[in-house]
């Protein structure tokens, strides 16, 4: 029925109902938008974290490189019994231990030296002769994981590649002791001779990948000599030349990973990928008589020493080209939990019933619209 003014009465939907409708409709849209925005923000934050971490890692590496790009005195050998240190070998199993021994004219002893230069233990090789010990090498037994020491009794000042010199030389293989305590050890003796005649040699090294023994001769035209793949104790093993060596080599050593080896002379050191394939020359500190060289356990630097009382041992960093390749870096995982897209399937975290969030919001919206319709109907009556 018309009003007194003649206007038709218009039905008004209460404001509360309109607000409820807005909330319900928004509810069907906002979860998807919110999840998308959250995922985008999370990804951006993760990228920023990764960039910051990479920058910090690079800066740390640059700082370490600046700190390690020069030689430094590591220690001095304090033991008065060591007056002619003629070789160095870094222990593969005892952290911070370096082995050394005396040159000719001394007994069959090796000395375990700590990073402070003091002797931790003295080991006597009971069944060995110390005719002219000139070098020592360390390796790891690939079957047992135990350390192995190789002592080279290969000095031969009368050798001339012809008829002079010893008919054969010896290398002693000793299982590295498990504890740093004075002891008498027994060795396996391998006798060796050169296929091209007697040589004077001071360098001994073992390839950690194959276990093969190499001797480096000390001559004006020196050579790298390989022992047989399997050494025998019941016969003389033949050493065969496989490459040349620098002038007057005084020691040699393989990198812990077997990727390279170094040969020391009185003047410098040379790093090789394989015999004859030079990687780099390394400048050595001035020493009274450069006699020894070895790699650090991580293969990133060299240790070099000299004869004489209170003799110094220096650590010399390797150039980048001669360092072992870094291990692959594992993929970075973010500690920040990632948002789950609202358009994905049901997630146990959406509700105890496992119903997707969009379905729940749609049900709420439909219920709200039904209520609003009912209110509007009542208001129009």
Image (cartoon, helix red, strand yellow):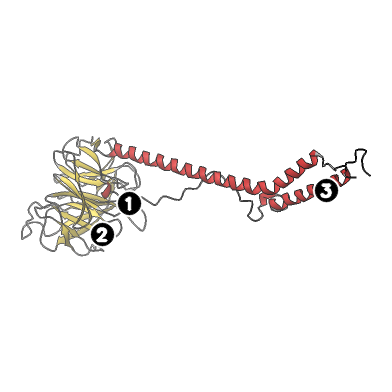
Tell me the element at label 3.
Answer: helix
Which residue appears at 34% of the width and 43% of the height? 95
Which of the two labelled residues, at mark 2 and mark 3, occupies the earlier sequence position?
A: 2
- Real-space Cα distance between discs 2 and 3? 91 Å
Q: Which residue is mark 3?
A: 373
Rounded to the nearest angstrom, the CA distance separating label 1 from label 2 is 22 Å
118 above or below 242?
above
Q: Do the residues under discs 1 and 2 have CB atoms within 8 angstroms?
A: no
On residue 76, which mark appears? none
Residue 262, position in %: x, y?
22, 50
At horizontal 9% and vertical 51% (from top left) the residue drawn is: 157
Where residue 312 appears, as percent x and y from the top left, is 21, 37
The quadrant in which the C terminus is found is top right
Callout 1 secondary element: loop
Could you say which is closer to the camera, residue 27 or residue 337?
27
Q: Residue 215, how many percent across, how many down?
A: 19, 56
Is residue 133 visible to us here?
A: no
Would you name the residue on which mark 1 appears? 325
Q: Counting residues from the N terminus, which is met first, the one under dot 1 or under dot 2? A: 2
């Amino acid at each position: 029925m018309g009003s007194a003014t003649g206007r038709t009465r218009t039905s008004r939907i209460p404001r509360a109902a309109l607000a409820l409708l807005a909330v319900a409709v928004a509810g069907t849209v906002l979860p998807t938008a919110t999840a998308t925005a959250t995922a985008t923000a999370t990804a951006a934050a993760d990228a920023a974290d990764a960039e910051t971490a990479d920058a910090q890692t690079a800066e740390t590496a640059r700082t370490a490189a600046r700190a390690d790009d020069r030689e430094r005195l590591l220690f001095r050998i304090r033991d008065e019994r060591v007056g002619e240190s003629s070789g160095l070998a870094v222990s593969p199993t005892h952290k911070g231990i370096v082995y050394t021994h005396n040159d000719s004219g001394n007994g069959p002893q090796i000395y375990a030296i700590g990073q402070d230069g003091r002797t931790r233990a003295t080991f006597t090789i009971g069944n060995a002769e110390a005719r002219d010990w000139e070098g020592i090498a360390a390796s790891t037994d690939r079957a047992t994981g135990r350390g192995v020491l190789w002592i080279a009794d290969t000095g031969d000042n009368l050798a001339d590649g012809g008829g002079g010199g010893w008919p054969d030389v010896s290398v002693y293989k000793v299982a590295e002791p498990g504890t740093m305590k004075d002891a008498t050890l027994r060795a396996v003796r391998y006798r060796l001779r050169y296929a091209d005649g007697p040589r004077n040699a001071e360098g001994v090294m073992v390839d950690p990948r194959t276990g093969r023994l190499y001797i480096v001769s000390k001559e004006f035209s020196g050579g790298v000599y390989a022992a047989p793949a399997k050494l025998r104790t019941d016969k003389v093993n033949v050493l065969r030349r496989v490459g040349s060596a620098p002038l007057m080599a005084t020691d040699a050593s393989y990198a812990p990973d077997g990727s390279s080896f170094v040969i020391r002379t009185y003047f410098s050191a040379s790093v090789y990928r394989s015999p004859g394939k030079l990687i780099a020359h390394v400048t050595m500190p001035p020493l009274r008589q450069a006699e020894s060289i070895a790699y650090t356990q991580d293969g990133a630097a060299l240790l070099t020493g000299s004869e004489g009382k209170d003799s110094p041992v220096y650590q010399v960093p390797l150039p980048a080209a001669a360092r072992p390749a870094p291990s692959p870096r594992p993929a970075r995982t973010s500690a920040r939990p990632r948002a789950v897209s609202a358009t994905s399937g049901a997630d146990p975290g959406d509700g105890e019933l496992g119903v997707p969030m969009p379905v729940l919001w749609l049900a709420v919206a439909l219920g709200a619209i039904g209520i609003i319709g009912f209110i509007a109907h009542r208001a129009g009556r």
